[in-house]
Amino acid sequence: MSRNKIVLLIGILVFIMPFLGFPSSWKTIFYVIFGGILIIIAAIGHVRRRSPMVTERREVVTEVYVETNGSSEF
């Protein structure tokens, strides 16, 4: 399941939580759990975005041509 789907599901659960009839203490626990999951998802996304992309280093080889006019003057 992708991160976007998880965030959407948690948002829906938080939206309908007041109407489900859970005791207040249970709601608090659920809100803390949902908030923790969202924090973890956000932290993982931040770390992935900030990590440098791994790329191969390729040495670029170019040939150099020097044109001479035949004189030995500088």
Image (cartoon, rainbow, N blue to C red):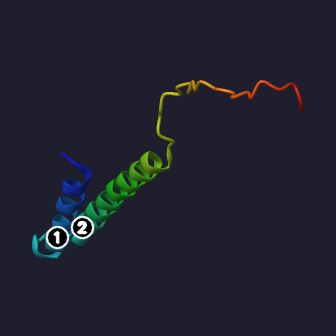
Quadrant hosting residue 38: bottom left
* Residue wearing tag 1: 17
Quadrant hosting residue 36: bottom left
- In three-dimensional space, the C-alpha distance between marks 2 and 1, rounded to whole angstroms, equals 7 Å
| Residue type (three-letter) at the residue carrying disc 1 | Met
Viewer-side residue, 37 vs 24: 37
| Residue type (three-letter) at the residue carrying disc 2 | Lys
Viewer-side residue, 17 vs 68: 68
Secondary structure at badge 1 equals helix
| Residue at 31% in and 57% down | 33
Q: Is residue 59 above or below residue 13?
A: above
| Residue at 47% in and 34% down | 54
**Camera-nearest label, 2 or 1:** 1
Image quadrant occupied by the N terminus: top left
- Expressed as whole percent of the image width and height from the top left, the position of residue 26 reads 24, 63
Quadrant hosting residue 5: bottom left
Q: Check contact, mark 2 vs mark 1: CB within 8 A.
A: yes
Q: Residues within 10 Å of mark 2 (few under 14, many from 20)?
A: some
- Expressed as whole percent of the image width and height from the top left, the position of residue 72 reads 87, 25
- Expressed as whole percent of the image width and height from the top left, the position of residue 12 reads 16, 67
| Residue at 89% in and 30% down | 73
Label annotation for residue 27: 2
Lower sequence index among marks 2 and 1 = 1
Secondary structure at badge 2 equals helix
- Expressed as whole percent of the image width and height from the top left, the position of residue 24 reads 24, 72
